[in-house]
Image: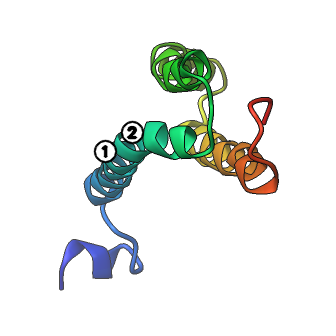
Amino acid sequence: MNEAARAGGRMPAAYRLAGFYFAYFSFNGIFSAYWGLYLKALSFAAWQIGVLMSLQQIMRIVGPNLWGWLADRIGRRAAIIRFVGLASVVSFVGVLIDQRFGW
């Protein structure tokens, strides 16, 4: 019997972490390549595309530091990752609602 079967069908933590990173970097690799082109197709100005592209990099600098501090403070790492993932999906829904720069 393998570890997952003994743990009640749950995957080992290393596999869950690997799956998270696989999904994260796959999304970023696909999204980053086409986001600028999509914005250009929507007739955004170059400075608007630059601002929207830079938000990704800013959040990659600020986000992990904030999440790490919060995880150390309250000690619920998995809950923080789930919350941040859900919040990012909910906030991105604005792109589906309206394609203006403000969204």
Q: Which mark is residue 29?
A: 1
The spot of residue 15 in percent (x, y) is 27, 59
- What residue is shown at x 74% (from left), y 45% (from top)? 99
Classed neighbour count for the residue bearing mark 1: other residues with Cα under 10 Å, few (<14), some (14–19), many (≥20): few
How far apart are labels 2 and 1 at the CA level? 6 Å
Figure coloring: rainbow
User: Looking at the picture, does residue 86 appear above or below residue 63?
Assistant: below
Q: Amino acid at mark 1?
A: Gly
Q: Quadrant of the N terminus?
A: bottom left
Name above or below for residue 2 compared with residue 20. below
Image marks 2 and 1: residues in contact by CB distance under 8 Å: yes
SS for dot 1 = helix
User: Where residue 83 appears, x then y in whole percent?
Assistant: 67, 44
The picture places residue 57, in percent across and down from the top left corner, at 45, 19
The location of residue 96, given as percent across then percent down, is 73, 56
Question: Which picture quadrant has residue 87?
Answer: top right
User: Label 2, on which residue?
Assistant: 32
Q: Say whether residue 81 is left or right of residue 33.
A: right
Instruction: Give the number of the disc on residue 87.
Output: none
The number of numbered discs placed on residues in the rendered structure image is: 2
What SS does tag 2 mark?
helix
Q: Residue at x 78, y 36 (%)?
A: 103
The residue depicted at 35 percent of the width and 57 percent of the height is 16
- Which residue: 57% across, 15% down? 47
